[in-house]
Amino acid sequence: RGEEEIQKELQDKHVSAAEDLQTYSEREWKGNTTKSLLIRKGYEAIASEFNLRKVRGDNYCALRAVLFQVLSQSKQLPAWLHDSDISKAQSGQWFKLTIFSMTLPQKKIWQEAVQCKSLEERERMCQQVFRGHDEEYELLEALKFLMLRTAVQLHSDMEKGSDVPEFCWLLFARDSSKCPKTFLTNHLRHVGFNGGLEQVEMCLLGYSLQETIRVVRLYKCDTEEFITYYPNDHKNASPLCLLTEDDRHYNVLVPKNPPPSQINCSLYNEMF
């Protein structure tokens, strides 16, 4: 990339300040086409419960949206970050990667987030991270390594006949992803560059982080898939809330009355 493009990226926020959903919808989805009406209806259904943070629209957006949520909500270091085996290869000669140590800059950033004394301080800290500098991309690539590490363990469990989450069978049923090696080669290594995460990979991301990702899928408004959980068999009380218009680009939803587990949304009650 040219120097001008790099400098412009460094000046832009990769995750914006929160704004009103209804205002955003009316600005971005004008007109009366079938799609515009559907998307606006989806926004209207959740506008009283959430505000919106726009996320930079590149192929890292799903990882970036989830990571921002996790860091901005962290009150303690996640259990997987304490795991002494986080940087150990587990499955043979193919697993020769240059990996970012999860115990150096990544753990340091997580510790800084946990130690913030207020939401405002944590907000400022997160905005400094998500500005296109090396530390942001190191964190995003580290999430990919965490996903790969989890995939290796789950595939090993499958081969042993152990119980695994339902999404594992879908993840490794693809001709291009029969094992962790082909999953890395054909899918994961391209995330952030030539493509984003597919739905089954969103399940893997949530499982790897020991979180539930709840996504409002606006183009699925009026269907049972309007709100989807990743993974769908592991729902915790305070999920990470995202929004998508097309299953490709993801933005962050900010509950107006946190915590999310206490939100009284009639739409959600009707659907679940």
Image (tube, rainbow, N blue to C red):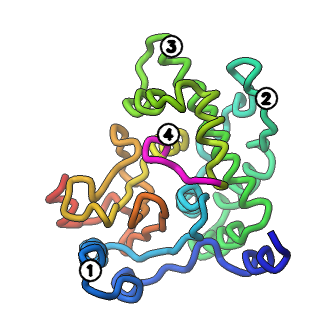
Amino acid residing under circle 3: Glu
Residue closer to the observer: 8 or 230 = 8
- Residue position marked by numbered label 3 in the rendering: 159
Q: Nearer the viewer, residue 237 or 206?
A: 206
Which segment did they paint magenta? 194-201
Q: Is residue 61 above or below residue 174?
A: below
The amino acid type found where label 1 is placed reads: Thr
CA neighbours of label 3 inside 10 A, class few (<14), some (14 to 19), many (20+): few
Question: In the rendered structure, which disc, 4 or 2, sits on the residue that comes first in sequence?
Answer: 2
Q: Is 272 located above or below residue 103 in the figure?
A: below
Measured Cα–Cα span from mark 1 to mark 4: 35 Å
Q: Nearer the viewer, mark 1 or mark 3?
A: 1
Q: Residue at x 47, y 59 (%)?
A: 248
Label 4 secondary element:
helix
Residues at marks 3 and 2, CA–CA distance in whole angstroms:
22 Å
- Of mark 1 and mark 4, the one earlier in the sequence is 1
Quadrant of the rendered image containing residue 127 = bottom right
Q: Which residue is denoted by mark 1 in the rendering? A: 33
Could you say where residue 6 lies in the image, as x and y percent from the top left? Answer: 79, 74
- Read off the residue under disc 2: 96
- Residue underneath mark 4: 204
Q: Earlier in the sequence, mark 3 or mark 2?
A: 2
